[in-house]
Image (cartoon, helix red, strand yellow):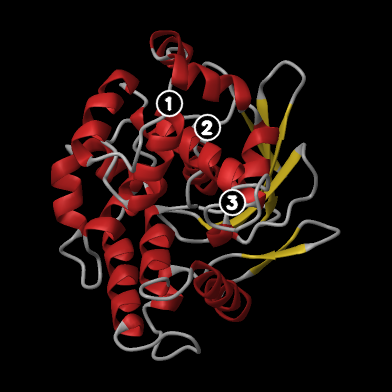
Amino acid sequence: METFTLVPRGPFSLAASIGFLEGFTPASYSGAGDSVLELAFPVEGSWRTAGVRVRQDDDGAVAAEIVSPAEPGPDLVAEARPQVERILSLDVDGSGFPAVGERDPVVGAAQAKYPGLRPVGFWSPYEAAAWTIIGHRIRITQAAAVKARMAEQLGEPVSFGDRVVHAFPSPQRLAELDTFPGLAGRKPEWLRSVARAALDGQLDAARLRAMPPEEALADLKKLPGIGDFSAGLTLLRGAGAPDAGPGSEPRLARAVALAYGLPGPATPEQIAAISDKWRPYRTWVTLLLRVQLEYSTGDITGRQGHAPTS
């Protein structure tokens, strides 16, 4: 087995990340405990399926072990390492994040409530884009069930010893998709387009992160079935852009209103003005406020006090 170590810059809690994932509906993640994270995903580049077990040591360092394939080789290790870093937001220097809370007491209170929590992304922009298509015009729980069945039937299984995790199907597999239960209308066609874009490098996370956000979003919206919301989710939650300007979708508007004591949902102008103080971690603060909304109101699950699901 190959191992590598990631050293967080700034506050980071793997246990907080696991807690988030266990309530994050698209991930359908059922953990191995609050100290171990087991991931199965197609690795960007070769798109070979890998299984990675992640732990955080007492000194804060994050140890990652590739358990599958048994002999990954240096090329796969080189591809998997930055992907794991990005999934956990460890590719971003978070040493300046506490300063955001110092200049904005609302953010500081959220940081204290959820210490060390950073965004946990989709395993890749490819999977994020596919999720938006699967979930188009159906409930989030329905979409999660379809995505889980696709992983079980079309993805590769990865054994972690006492349990098996099915990875989302590789783009090579999804590019051949004709139909699948729960995918209505043009969704199979759109998923094939996403798969081809991944194989062509259009959805490469490093590529998207290197582009100005407006340019990246415009490029993503060239894909069939990808609109404003889907492009934003793919960039923020798939490529892991840490400082994208928050959008104006209703759930965020309610989260900002709750946190800042506004009389009604925040307007786009209010969100833009308030979030300017969050730079260069606007994506991270957006996550904290949405988590706070879910824990406080059960906005998605309807279960107040439970882990967030989106």
Total labels drawn: 3
Q: CA distance from mark 2 to mark 1?
A: 10 Å
First of labels 3, 2 by sequence position = 2
Question: Do the residues under discs 2 and 1 have CB atoms within 8 angstroms?
Answer: yes
Q: CA distance from mark 3 to mark 2?
A: 20 Å
Measured from the top left, where is residue 205 in percent x and y? Answer: 34, 46
The residue that disc 1 covers is 92
Q: Nearer the viewer, residue 263 or 197?
A: 263
Disc 1 marks a residue whose amino acid type is Val
Disc 2 marks a residue whose amino acid type is Arg
Left or right, 125 with reference to 151: left
Residue at position x 65%, y 47% from top? 307
Viewer-side label of 3, 2: 3
Disc 3 marks a residue whose amino acid type is Gly
Residue at position x 34%, y 29% from top? 282
- Crowdedness near tag 1: few (<14), some (14–19) or many (≥20) residues, C-alpha within 10 Å: some
The residue that disc 3 covers is 298
Q: Nearer the viewer, residue 199 or 93?
A: 93
Q: Nearer the viewer, residue 138 or 2?
A: 138
